[in-house]
């Protein structure tokens, strides 16, 4: 990344939505990856999410703090092994607050504590359809951190899953925050580029750590 002729710049994708490249340095990426691997262990570990219509999400998921399932939250893995959801660590909440301050400014940091993490693992063939993060009661900004393979992140509008949208390349260590007028924008991942993760991570695939305030 450092060898690029023109380093990637922080970009406002839409009002309230900001992409900050290389927000996590190599050491922090490795530490977060180690934590994700531990969180992904059973019980209440990495699982395949099944939709009410009988389909399955291609990205696998593990939750912290509150367990998300389509389209609600619970304190146990109600659509899996029914184990209690793993706790949300306070240091992850502080990381989320720093991310919001850096991306949107200190005035955008919510008073309420971050208490939900949805961690999605994408292998080479995984995708995520256009959707909104609308199952929380809080309107606090959503914080998204990327580890591993580069992906195309499609950030759309609040009204429809269709255009207009903007495609953003998210690499390992990148931060994306969306709040305010962009909080309920549709977004998804149409493509992951296999083999693009930093070699030092020894990760095949992509991890996305999404941090939210429940408002519950």
Image: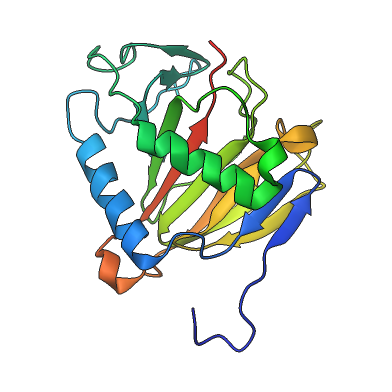
Q: Which x, y percent locates residue 173? A: 46, 60
Nearest the camera: 86 or 79? 86
Q: Residue furthest left?
A: 42
Does residue 27 appear in the picture of this structure? Answer: yes
Q: Residue at x 49, y 28 (%)?
A: 114
Q: Which x, y percent locates residue 137? A: 62, 14
Q: How is the image coloured?
A: rainbow
Q: Which x, y percent locates residue 33? A: 29, 52
Q: Is residue 128 toward the left or the right of residue 147 in the image?
A: right
**Relative height, residue 10 to residue 45 (above, below):** below
Nearest the camera: 114 or 151? 114
Q: Which x, y percent locates residue 151? A: 51, 58
Nearest the camera: 194 or 142? 142
**Relative height, residue 86 to residue 202 (above, below):** above
Q: Residue at x 81, y 30 (%)?
A: 159
Q: Residue at x 44, y 20 (%)?
A: 68
Count how many numbered circles sit on residues in the image: 0
Location of residue 15 (image quadrant): top right
Does residue 57 appear in the picture of this structure? Answer: no
**Relative height, residue 195 to residue 53 (above, below):** below
Q: Is residue 18 toward the left or the right of residue 144 in the image?
A: right
Location of residue 77 (image quadrant): top left
Q: Is residue 46 toward the left or the right of residue 143 in the image?
A: left
Q: Residue at x 56, y 85 (%)?
A: 4
**Relative height, residue 45 to residue 201 (above, below):** above
């Amino acid at each position: 990344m450092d060898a690029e002729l023109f380093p990637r710049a922080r970009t406002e994708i839409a009002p309230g939505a900001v992409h900050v490249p290389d927000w996590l340095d190599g050491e922090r990426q490795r530490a977060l990856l180690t934590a994700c691997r531990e969180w992904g262990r059973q019980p209440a570990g990495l699982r395949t999410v099944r939709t009410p219509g009988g389909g399955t999400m291609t990205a696998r998921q593990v939750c912290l703090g509150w367990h998300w399932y389509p389209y609600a939250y619970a304190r146990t893995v109600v659509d899996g092994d029914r184990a209690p959801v793993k706790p949300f660590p306070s240091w992850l909440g502080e990381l989320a607050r720093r991310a919001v301050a850096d991306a949107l400014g200190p005035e955008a940091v919510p008073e309420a504590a971050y208490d939900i993490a949805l961690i999605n693992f994408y292998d080479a063939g995984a995708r995520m359809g256009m959707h909104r993060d609308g199952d929380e009661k809080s309107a606090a900004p959503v914080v998204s951190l990327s580890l591993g393979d580069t992906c195309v992140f499609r950030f759309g509008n609040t009204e429809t899953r269709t255009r207009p949208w903007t495609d953003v390349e998210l690499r390992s260590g990148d931060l994306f925050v969306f709040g305010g007028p962009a909080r309920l924008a549709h977004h998804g991942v149409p493509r992951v580029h296999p083999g693009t993760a930093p070699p030092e991570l020894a990760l095949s695939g992509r991890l996305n750590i999404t941090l939210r305030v429940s408002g519950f």
